[in-house]
Image: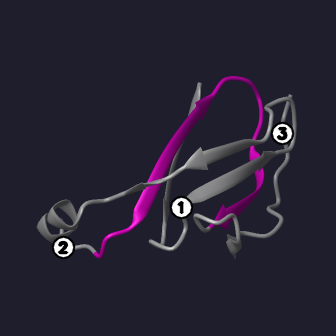
């Protein structure tokens, strides 16, 4: 099993993950780190999400969206190759 943990600026509310093999593309809704927890950790609040999958794959691109679906972040194509 592979687990992904992602952190994004507050303006990103969901992220679409594109995979280069058998794993289906997936949209992950992000959670906001509370102001209390952020202050305690000496961080600015940010949004975070997790996703787990099995199989041999990697993320080939990720795109962040606002609550209205507007693209607010695009990681661009990633150099991703799956080894068998």
Which label is found at residue 82? 3
Q: Classify residue 47 as left or right of residue 78.
A: left
**Extreme-front residue of the structure:** 68
Q: Secondary structure at mark 1?
A: loop
Residue 34 placement (x, y as % from top left): 25, 60
Residue under label 2, please give it. 42
Up the image or down, 3 lies above or below 28; here it is above
Q: What residue lies at 49% left-to-right and 53% top-to-bottom?
A: 30
**Quadrant in the rendering for residue 53:** top right
Position of residue 16 in the picture relative to residue 33 (left or right): right
Magenta stretch bounds: 44-65
Q: Earlier in the sequence, mark 1 or mark 3?
A: 1
CB atoms of marks 1 and 2 within 8 Å: no
Give the label on residue 59, or none.
none
Residue at 15% x, 64% y is 36
Residue 13's mark?
Answer: 1
Q: Earlier in the sequence, mark 1 or mark 2?
A: 1
16 lies above or below 51:
below
CA gap between label 3 and label 2 equals 37 Å
Mark 1 touches mark 3? (CB < 8 Å): no
Q: Nearer the viewer, residue 55 or 47?
A: 47
Helix, strand or loop status at disc 3:
loop
For label 1, the crowd category at 10 Å Cα-Cα, with few meaning under 14, some 14 to 19 and many 20 or more, is many
> Is residue 48 shown above or below 45?
above
C-alpha separation, residue under disc 1 versus residue under disc 2: 22 Å
Query: Residue 22: horizontal and vertical position, in percent?
Result: 86, 29
Color scheme of the displayed model? one colour
Q: Main secondary structure of the magenta part?
A: strand
């Amino acid at each position: 099993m592979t687990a992904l943990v992602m952190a994004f600026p507050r303006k990103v509310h969901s992220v679409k993950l594109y995979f280069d093999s058998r794993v289906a593309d997936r949209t992950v809704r992000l959670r906001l780190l509370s102001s209390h927890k952020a202050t305690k950790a000496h961080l600015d609040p940010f949004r975070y999400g997790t996703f787990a999958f099995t199989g041999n794959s990697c993320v080939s691109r990720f795109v962040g969206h606002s609550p209205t679906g507007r693209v607010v972040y695009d990681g661009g194509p990633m150099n991703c190759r799956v080894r068998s």
